[in-house]
Amino acid sequence: MRRDQPLALRRPVEHLEQHPGRAQSRVELGAPHQALERVHVCLGAPLARRARRQIGHRVPLSLTRAGAATPRGVNALPRSGDGVHPARRRDPGVAAVRSACPRRRCAVPDEASSVVGVRRALAKLRTARSLPELYDRATRAVCQECGFDRAVLFRLQGPEMIPESVEFKGDPAWAAEFQRLGQTNRMRIDHDIVETEMIYTREPMLVPEAQDNPRGFKPLVEASRTSSYTAAPLIPENVIIGFIHADCYFAGRDVGPHDRDVLGTFAEGLGYAIQRTALLAEAKAQRSKIHLLRSVVDEMVGKVSDVVAAIERAAGDEERPSAPVLTIPGFEITRREADILRLMEQGESDEQIAAQLGIPRTGVGWHVERTLEKLGAASRDEAVARYRRVTA
């Protein structure tokens, strides 16, 4: 094997050098276009063009050998969009072609489109009015706008990670099943779990070869069937409250550093959205409590005013035979009522009258109504005018 060959082709070439008969039995070594044509048919035009760009003029021969390594190898590859993960295939010919042409890495979005995607995803969080609604919007948005197929948002409850929202693009039944599994088999943050690293670094992370990682949480890793995923911490108010995980399972590609950075950027904005939504919910709860307290206070003030009015009525009855302050034919005005009339004449409001006389505001209203009845006045201005005429 030549050392100047691309690294991606060394394994298939080694395989073919050990079994030279297989290559020549299917495709002539002098016909590299046949291998490229088979790649074009099986994987589609975009991947065929990608293969040509990546491997250049030296690779057609290697592709020919790789494609001929086993007749069923290339034919076993999933066609574009069939949703079958190539890593599940065990045929050596498939492995050879996958090594020669990395699977669907051209699907990774560029930096500019990723920035736009994150901005659009965060924009979808603005109108959320509760944390559960925000969590559901976040997992949907990261799949719709950020290039991921699946997303899971975990909330930390003590040392346990609870899946609050799960989005599997196009497969809600699987998402619901995964969420139920995560709630019954809760992941615990300890030294045995790979996610523990984010507690200390506070940075997003990449988990390649997830199925073989000894520090992965096997119940969820196996249930998700993920080959690799990326995760990022959620840190509102400088406190880690959870994590968001994402992968590209249905697209059939492994996530890489670019995906990790995209998810980390989204998680940073999501942290601020969580803080804002939590503050709005707390303000709403406090407003409800204030309204309830106000109604209770108003009820208590009304009851106290009734008691005060009853006491003053009794006091007025005691004053009547002795010395009324003001006598109008058929009516008698008590000292308290005279004080209120005097303050009304000065243009004081009910609040000001109550403050000066040391009585509840509702008590002022009761005295005013009683005085209007005694004076036969239809309004406060008329009562004040009659009071002026009598006292002039």
Image (cartoon, grey):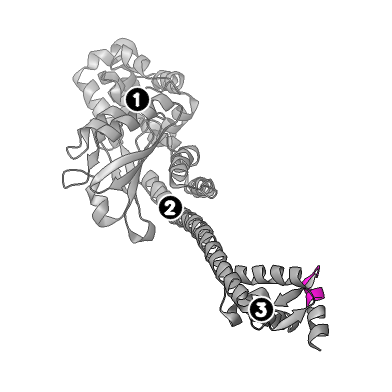
Alpha carbon of mark 1 to alpha carbon of mark 3: how far?
94 Å
Say which amino acid is labelled 1: His
Q: Is residue 322 left or right of residue 88?
A: right
**Residue 62, how many percent across, how many down?**
32, 26
359 or 322, which is in the foreground?
A: 322
The residue that appears at 24% across and 39% down in the rendered structure is 187
**Residue 80, how many percent across, how many down?**
45, 23
In the image, residue 1 above or below residue 189: above
> Looking at the rendered structure, which numbered label has been put on residue 360?
none
| Image quadrant occupied by the C terminus | bottom right
Q: Nearer the viewer, mark 1 or mark 3?
A: 3
| Image quadrant occupied by the N terminus | top left
Tell me if residue 244 can be seen.
Answer: yes
Say which amino acid is labelled 3: Thr
Q: Nearer the viewer, mark 3 or mark 2?
A: 3
Task: Specify whether residue 129 is painted magenta.
Answer: no
Say which amino acid is labelled 2: Ile
Q: Which residue is mark 2?
A: 274
**Residue 115, how many percent across, how many down?**
50, 50
In the image, residue 242 above or below residue 23: below
Kind of element beneath mark 2: helix
Task: Decide which of tag 2 and tag 1 comes sooner along the chain.
Answer: 1
Q: Is residue 375 left or right of residue 280?
A: right
> Looking at the rendered structure, which numbered label has been put on residue 334?
3
Q: Which residue is mark 1?
A: 85
